[in-house]
Image (cartoon, rainbow, N blue to C red):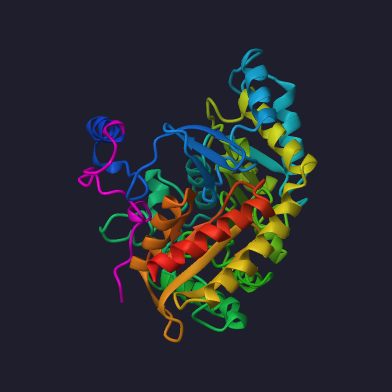
Amino acid sequence: MEVTKKILELNAFDMNAAAGLSPEVVTLIGRRRATFGPTSMLFYEKPLNLVRGEGVWLHDADGTRYLDAYNNVPSVGHCHPRIVEAVARQMGTLNTHTRYLYSNVYTYAERLLGTMPAAVSNIVFTCTGSESADFALRVARAVTGGTGFIVTDNAYHGNTSAVTEISPSSASAEPRPPYVFVVPAPDTYREISEAVGRRLARDVRTAIAKMNAIGIRFAGFIADSIFSSDGVFPGEPGFLRETLEAVHAAGGVYIADEVQPGFGRTGEKMWGFDRHGLVPDMVIMGKPMGNGFPMGGVAIKPDLLKTFGETSGYFNTFGGNPVAAAAGIAVLDVLKDEGLQQNSFETGAYLRSEIRIAGSEGGCIGDVRGAGLYIGVDIVKDTQTHEPDRDTAEKIVNGMRDRNILIGIAGGHGNVLKIRPPLCFNREHADIFLDGLRGALADAS
């Protein structure tokens, strides 16, 4: 089996391969390397020098326009004028922390919680998804008395010390902490789709039993419900229910990481967990909340927050600040007013269907899967054996970049094309994407 490739290594630019790039880009790469050091990665064989964005388009310093089919941070579109105006207006009025009263912060909290299950009715604001995940781990340990967590084998949940420990896709080569147990992701391509739910629940029960056997108390299961870093496996709605039952039966909590599938991304529901009819104990939010303005949060059942608060406090200076609230309210308004969840559902279905047709003309596309505008395309060496083909996947990604279309890569083998454009990506944009994909597939074959 291939060695799992860490998330930051996927389609990363080789910093020593700048020959042939423009002098301006070479200079910028040199400045970046001198100031950022070796840990900050760039995308593509030819890195982008971007200067402006609007909607689904990004513009570089040479005036070239790129179709963004990768970035979910600007969830309602790059530099959306309503978000920009809301942030600028609030920044010119007041921005402070949450130890003072301020109405729009509560307005945002009420509206956001209004999209959650009734049982999940409290919220703690943070600045990033990583902070959100870190806080959720603290709560899980406090309310269960346990330390053990279960995650999937190529999951990514953030970059604090605690969260990196439960993020196999970004962890170092050092041994995994003894209280972190890993189960295989629900690969709906390489096993029978109907069986993945039963298998995942069985694996979670087995992991819990192993914890108990070595004296580690189970605290919780954390998952992104479309398993994006694992290779994009949304599966059939409902397949996660048995796993949730197993988690609760063992006294653990279920933490839904909605940084990737949340805010209408799947098209079917506002939240990824809602596709499965689940009620999480905690919901982690991050990147898409503010359309690029740094914000995050944890929606949580009140009894859990109460128990945590009896022994601990939590204060985040910038979490839930008035400017963040203004950005968040504007995002919710745009999602509703522009019908972006429905657009995600319709455009995503069209795009998946057309990618399958394009794939039938060649031999490297093994599977096309997704929910709404989160799509994974499994690139393989052989459609019968399903053997992953990392090299061809990277050729396709760079071939798309050469055609001014941006996508990424996911999965432990680095062979899954990751397609997750801003939610304003429509059928016209999809057709441009498909033209580019056909060309990139032809060149990569």
> Which quadrant would the N terminus be assigned to in this image?
bottom left
Q: Residue at x 58, y 72 (%)?
A: 356
Q: Is residue 178 left or right of residue 89?
A: left
Q: Is residue 258 left or right of residue 268?
A: left
The image shows residue 304 at horizontal and vertical percentages of 63, 48
Q: Residue at x 20, y 45 (%)?
A: 16
Establish if 84 lies above or below 217. above
* Residue toward you, 407 or 259: 407
The image shows residue 182 at horizontal and vertical percentages of 42, 67
Q: Is residue 397 left or right of residue 96?
A: left
Q: Seen from this angle, which residue lies furthest top?
A: 93
- Tell me where residue 380 sits by quadrant: bottom left
Task: State the extent of the magenta-drawn residues as a range.
Answer: 1-24
* Residue toward you, 396 or 230: 396
Q: Residue at x 59, y 18 (%)?
A: 96
Q: Seen from this angle, which residue lies furthest bottom?
A: 384
